[in-house]
Each structure stands twice: as C-alpha cells, then as structure tokens.
C-alpha cells in the first residue's frame, strides 16, 4: 500500500526533537520530568544565559527573548516547544503561538488552581513568583479570585542567587529563609518560577516538613505528552531518547 503524502509527513515529524527553553538552569526540572514521561523523545534544551533572569525585565524584553529562543528551536527543526519558565509563559506564550502556529507550544504556570482545591478552609498559600509574573494580568486575576488565600510574594533576586550559587550554599538558604520568614503559618507554598524547584528541600526544612509544595512542572510535561499524542506526533517506540544542551552567550554587564 502506498503511503499518502500527509501520512509520510506526520511520520517524519514524529522523529523531530522537542525544544525546551528557560533563562537558565531552572527549566531542567521540566526537562527531567518530560524525558521520564517520554523516554523515546529527543530533547533540545536552550538556556538563555545572556538574558537571565527574565523576571526583572520588561514585558517587551521578555517577549523578545522568548521569541528569539523559540525561533532558534524552530530553526533546529523542533516539532514542539516547552516554555519551561513561568515568567515567559505568563508574558509571551500567546505571542509565540501566533508566530509559530505549526508548532505545539506548552507553557509553565504556577499551580494555583490545584493548590486552592486542597487548601484548608482557614489556610493560605505563599506564591513565590518573579516580579514580571506577579504583574501579569493572568496571575493577578488568579490571586484576586482566591479571596486572600493566595499571598503573592514577588522576588527580585532569588532566581539569580540560585543560578549563581551552589544550591546548598549559605547564600541560597539565607535568601529562602528571609523570603518565607513573614509566613510561618502558611499551609502551602506555590513555586512560581522554574528556578525555585531546586530549593524544595530547603523550603520543607524551614517548615519542619509540615508544608505542601505545588510545582507546575509535572503538569506541563504531562500536557506536552498529551498534545503530542493527540496530534499523532509522539516519537516511535524504536527511537532512542536523547538530550542536547545549548546556551546563549553571557554578555558583559547583563
């Protein structure tokens, strides 16, 4: 039986890689989960070190950075793009989808809804987010609808501290402790930046283990797997999964 052109095209698409980008190392947790859920997929990870961190930049700067990163990955023949950054998702994902309509694009969002579903009647959650995410329309709306149950904490420096120091360093621990000190009775912490996933253990220790932590990374990876399956673009089982890493050049003074 002769294969139709459309079927041949989809078959070729299945073998193409998946692009993942973030401003630095934060998105590696999304990459880890995605590669575990989809062991046959080939991933390309792009760390935009030249413009890290995104969270302190303007909407225009973040949109430009995300567009350029997505463009690089599309140029590398990616069939899907995972925006492994809460800030870039909140600010730029609609732009990316309009610019690259033929590519599956999924984003990382703070896990506000699942947290609200599980909070006690008198409990509240601390949402650790970047300044840009805190100012986004979508996140502001979610916080307002929570009736005070979500307390947004915009952070200027934590992502950079994590990126530039050993995760077990005093600098990282002191920074996280200072951020959470005003909220000793919080019932949950929402990780609203991909970098914050790496300090999960420190957060648990600060609360003596009595804290729920919500991270959107698994939900994003699961969504990516679902979208690929629906589109018929999942990698064939005979393909061996792999990961390639790339980084933009760090600029002086950035």
Image: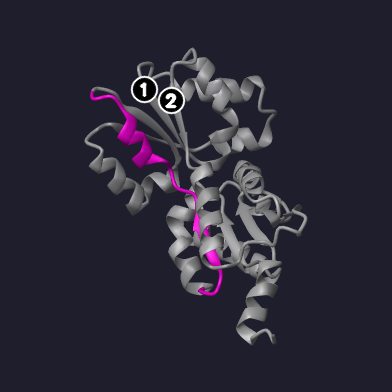
Magenta residue span = 101-121
Quarter holding residue 158: top right
Decide if residue 67 is on the left or right side of residue 78: left
Q: Residue at x 48, y 21 (%)?
A: 178
**Residue 235 locus on image (x, y percent):** 67, 61
Q: Position of residue 67 (x, y in %)?
A: 56, 65
> Do the numbered discs 1 and 2 sit on residues whose CB atoms are within 8 Å?
yes
Query: Where does label 2 land, which residue?
Result: 212
Q: In this rendering, does residue 72 appear at all?
A: no
* Drawn side of residue 117 relative to residue 98, left or right: left
Closest to the observer, 5 or 25: 5
Callout 1: few (<14), some (14-19), or many (20+) C-alpha neighbours within 10 Å?
many
**Left or right of 129 in this view: 186:** left
Residue that numbered label 1 is attached to: 187
Residue at screen point 37% across, 38% down = 114
User: On screen, 45 above or below 75?
Assistant: above
Give the residue drawn at x 49%, y 45%.
219
Q: Position of residue 193 (x, y in %)?
A: 51, 41
Which quarter shows the N terminus? bottom right
Q: Which element carries disc 2, helix, strand or loop?
A: strand
Earlier-in-chain disc, 1 versus 2: 1
**What x and y, as percent, mark residue 89?**
47, 54
Disc 2 residue crowd, few under 14, some 14–19, many 20+, Cα 10 Å: some
User: Which of the numbered marks, if any, corresponds to residue 83?
Assistant: none
What's the distance in space between the residues labelled 1 and 2, CA to CA? 6 Å
At x 26%, y 38%, the residue is: 146
Which residue is farthest front?
1
């Amino acid at each position: 039986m002769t294969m139709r052109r459309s079927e041949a095209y989809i078959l070729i698409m299945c073998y193409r890689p998946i692009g993942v980008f973030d401003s630095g190392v934060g998105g590696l947790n999304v990459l880890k989960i995605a590669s575990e859920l989809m062991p046959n997929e080939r991933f390309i990870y792009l760390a935009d070190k030249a413009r890290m961190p995104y969270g302190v930049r303007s909407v225009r700067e973040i949109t430009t950075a995300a567009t350029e990163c997505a463009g690089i990955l599309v140029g590398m023949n990616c069939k899907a793009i995972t925006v492994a950054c809460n800030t870039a998702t909140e600010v730029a994902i609609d732009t990316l989808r309009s610019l690259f309509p033929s590519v599956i694009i999924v984003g990382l969002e703070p896990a506000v809804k699942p947290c609200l579903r599980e909070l006690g009647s008198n409990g509240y959650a601390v949402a650790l987010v970047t300044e840009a995410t805190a100012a986004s329309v979508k996140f502001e709306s979610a916080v307002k609808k929570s009736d005070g149950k979500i307390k947004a904490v915009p952070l200027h420096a934590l992502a950079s501290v994590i990126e530039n120091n050993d995760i077990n360093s005093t600098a990282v621990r002191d920074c996280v402790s200072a951020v959470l000190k005003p909220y000793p009775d919080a019932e949950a912490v929402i990780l609203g930046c991909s970098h914050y996933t790496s300090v999960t253990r420190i957060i648990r220790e600060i609360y003596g283990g009595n804290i729920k932590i919500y991270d959107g990374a698994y939900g994003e990876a699961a969504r990516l797997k679902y979208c690929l399956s629906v589109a018929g673009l999942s990698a064939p089982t005979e393909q061996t999964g792999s990961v390639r890493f790339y980084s933009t050049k760090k600029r002086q003074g950035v």
